[in-house]
Amino acid sequence: MNNDAEKKPEPGKDFIRAMIDEDIKNRTFDGRVHTRFPPEPNGYLHIGHAKSICLNFGLAKEYGGKCNLRFDDTNPLKESNEYVRSIKEDVRWLGFDWEEREFYASDYFEKLYAFAEQLIQAGKAYVDSLSAEQIREYRGTLTLPGKESPYRGRSVEENLDLFRRMRAGEFPDGSHVLRARIDMSAANVIMRDPTLYRIRHAEHHRSGKAWCIYPMYDFTHCISDSLEGITNSLCSLEFENNRELYDWTLENLGAYRPRQTEFSRLNITRTVLSKRKLIQLVTEKKVGGWDDPRLPTLSGMRRRGYPPEAVRELCARVGVARAPSVVEFGMLEFCVREHLNRVAPRLMAVLNPIKLVIENYPEGQVEWFDMPLSPENPDLGTRKVPFSREILIEAEDFAEVPPPKFHRLKPGGEVRLRYAYYVTCNEVVKDKDGKIVELRCLYDPQSRGGDTPDGRKVKGTLHWVSAGQALPAEVRLYDYLFTRDDPEDMPEGQTFLDCLNPDSLKVGRAFIEPALAQCGVGDRVQFERLGYFCKDKDSTPENPVWNRSVTLKDSWAKQQSR
RNA sequence: AGGGGUGUCGCCAAGUUGGUAAGGCAACGGAUUUUGGUUCCGUCAUUCGAGGGUUCGAAUCCUUCCGCCCCUGCCA
């Protein structure tokens, strides 16, 4: 070993880690690292959230800190316990643990209210009685300053009285709001007297009917972070403008102030990651539900058979930066294949069967082979696979008139049936319409196991199942949900719904080897050549259902399509 | 009276105080192979949004343009 071998350039840290290193060096937060993942329970988590989860929980782990799970539940109209339930399930599935630190913004309502009164007391907030439309008009535009509300000058006493009566339920929805008194001509529109509280006579999924006024995001989030002692409040780029208000609020409250840092959210080609659109797909029944395997939701990906390791790997690979970006779907698929290739057992199934009759194999005989579950990982053990006179192979693995460089079965040609025997096709049987009914073959008894004593080589090895013992199964093959790279970018007058791919789900039949009967829901295997599959929850003993997670790379198919 | 961000290979992304463009995905070659998969090995930015300037030397400093993203919810 010599020392200059270690001079390899280390991959650079992302800007967030660099910032934290700096903070630790300067003891900015006493060397602490405390993050949080703050979803609003108004929908299911998707892979975009996974990036935030991996970042926040990952950072805490790397720096020996903590990460809280906090539900940002300040809008009772959109939220539900069902979403809370699914979010916790998905975070756990991804492999992260918030231990006892499960928080809810709604648990801070009383404290939040006290902070609001404190702001009023300090003359930094007032009750406005303009209508929503008027407030919008008064706000001005991006290029024109706003003007002050006539109610902006109310006395502290009047504001306090009004705010208390708002809480007491004396006023209808929309009649008053609490606003911060900042600057109606601020260049940052967010700072033009932002709304802090609104009246909403609605039942909250956790606090029930205890409240009829609810705090807004900008007021709630920073205080929640502060209360929990968060050091780094990481959020996506669209909150950049809100940072000024985050800092303003905490400063004017004299509260501990975490550091908000924004990063670019994850975008993936041919998919939509906005909650609004995902909800639309679900409620308009364009997909089967939140866990439809075509959806980029964590529950959909789980059902599709994507391992959590692959999702985490993707998040690690795309990194974190501030430049808006769109990752190719292929990057995700690569991560899925990479992990499954390492862990998934490899068995055989046939999608579009063609019968192969081995004329010199004894009628009625069945021999059971012990075959490895994975050629690369002997530790996985073996399974029993039956072989008999009638075998099913993939129709596309036979060509009567083979294209150049075709390695599979052809008239007069010899191939290997994986781990079984060499067979040679000597007759193609057709019906009167010229359709192939079966292939008559001869096998070489010497080639048992897939090798011959004379060592002769064969170009092709085929997957197969024994016709008599194979089990029928349903397979669901998926394609992109959308026909364009960017479903958001549509021609005039069209929406993302107009580029839904009608072929995104194809249901087919398959014949699978008997050993697969033992699989449980969620088990993942590779079907030789066909791809990685995951047993679906819709399975019944009579009709197992397998979802294709992802196909294998296929350079032959690619070459043919050129 | 607009403000805040951001632009490095088809995609993601490193580039410490200026010293002469990491890595991954994709793609393309080749070797190995009981599936055309996997694995391995190789190729792939004279150039960093564009133009000026400073400098012996700039993706990195100055300057002027240009593109893209976010902000006018009583959503988060």
Image (cartoon, coloured by chain):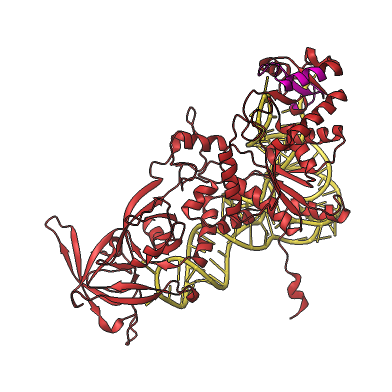
Percent position of residue A413, x then y = 26, 73
Q: Would residue A531 appear left or right of B4 to someone viewing this image?
A: left
In the rendered structure, does residue A428 fall within the stretch colored magenta?
A: no
Displayed quadrant of residue A207: top right
Q: Residue at x 45, y 37 (%)?
A: A499
Say which quadrant the C terminus of chain A sits in.
bottom left
Q: Can residue A366 be seen in this view?
A: yes
Instruction: Provide the residue span drawn in magenta.
Output: A160-189
Q: Which residue is drawn at 46% across and 34% down?
A: A497
Seen from this angle, which residue lies furthest left?
A432
Q: Residue at x 86, y 16 (%)?
A: A155
**Depth check: A218 or A159 in front?**
A159
Number of marks? 0
Seen from this angle, which residue lies furthest top?
A150
**Depth check: A449 or A291 in front?**
A291
Q: What is the display colour for chain B? A: yellow
Say which quadrant the N terminus of chain A sits in.
bottom right
Q: Vertical placement of A78 versus A465: above or below?
A: above
Displayed quadrant of residue A435: bottom left
Percent position of residue A474, x then y = 34, 54
Q: Vertical placement of A358 versus A509: above or below?
A: below
Q: Residue at x 73, y 54 (%)?
A: A60
Percent position of residue A342, x then y = 52, 67
Q: Is residue A274 visible?
A: no
Q: Would residue A250 appear left or right of A81 to someone viewing this image?
A: right
Percent position of residue A502, x then y = 38, 41
In the rendered structure, does residue A184 fall within the stretch colored magenta?
A: yes
Seen from this angle, which residue lies furthest bottom?
A453
Of all chains in the rendering, the one displayed in red is A
Q: Vertical placement of A394 versus A89: above or below?
A: below
